[in-house]
Image: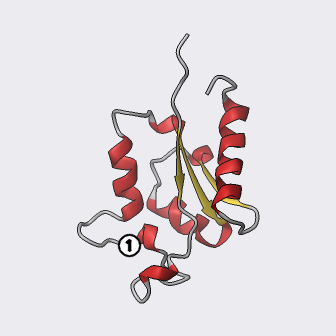
């Protein structure tokens, strides 16, 4: 039995290093830098054919959750989750890994 592959996209950062393009209310993952698609949309597109969309988890934060959901209307709603509190990258990865393990123990 093969292990199913999941992808975790961390999309909750404030993108402060991208200032002035990226700001608190307009984070870098929602920027359209070199095309009509945002960086988040381009990341999802790179996963097409590798990971089914129902196995892609997007982890954002409470402040950006609505903007991410509005952008990705066709994306599985249950696969967009917001961190309950801002922590660091390790905490975000742990939250995502826990969510994936809860869905599929073999992942």
Q: Residue furthest right?
A: 84
Q: Residue furthest bottom?
A: 20
Callout 1 secondary element: loop
Q: Is residue 93 left or right of residue 54?
A: right
In this view, the residue in front, 82 or 86, is 86
Q: Quadrant of the C terminus?
A: top right
Residue at x-position 60% and y-position 61%: 60
Q: Quadrant of residue 20?
A: bottom left
- Coordinates of residue 73 in the picture (x, y in percent): 47, 54
Residue at x-position 64% and y-position 66%: 61
Colour option used: secondary structure
Callout 1: 10 Å neighbours few (<14), some, many (20+)? some
Residue at x-position 54% and y-position 81%: 25
Residue at x-position 55% and y-position 21%: 3
Count of marks placed on residues? 1
Q: Is residue 33 above or below residue 72?
A: below
Kindly identify which residue carries mark 1.
31
Q: Residue furthest front?
A: 90
Q: Is residue 52 above or below residue 82?
A: above
- Coordinates of residue 23 in the picture (x, y in percent): 50, 84
- Coordinates of residue 7 in the picture (x, y in percent): 51, 41
Q: Is residue 66 above or below residue 15?
A: above
Q: Quadrant of residue 47?
A: top left
Q: Residue furthest top?
A: 1
- Coordinates of residue 1 in the picture (x, y in percent): 55, 10
């Amino acid at each position: 039995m093969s292990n199913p592959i999941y992808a975790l996209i961390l999309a909750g950062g404030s993108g402060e290093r991208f200032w002035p393009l990226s700001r608190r209310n307009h984070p870098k993952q929602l920027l359209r830098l070199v095309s009509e698609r945002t960086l988040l949309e381009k990341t999802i597109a790179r996963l097409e054919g590798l990971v089914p969309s129902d196995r892609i988890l997007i982890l954002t934060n409470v402040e950006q959750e609505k903007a991410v959901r509005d952008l990705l209307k066709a994306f599985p709603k249950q696969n967009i989750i917001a961190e309950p509190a801002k922590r660091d990258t390790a905490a975000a990865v742990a939250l995502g890994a826990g969510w994936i393990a809860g869905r599929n123990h073999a992942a």
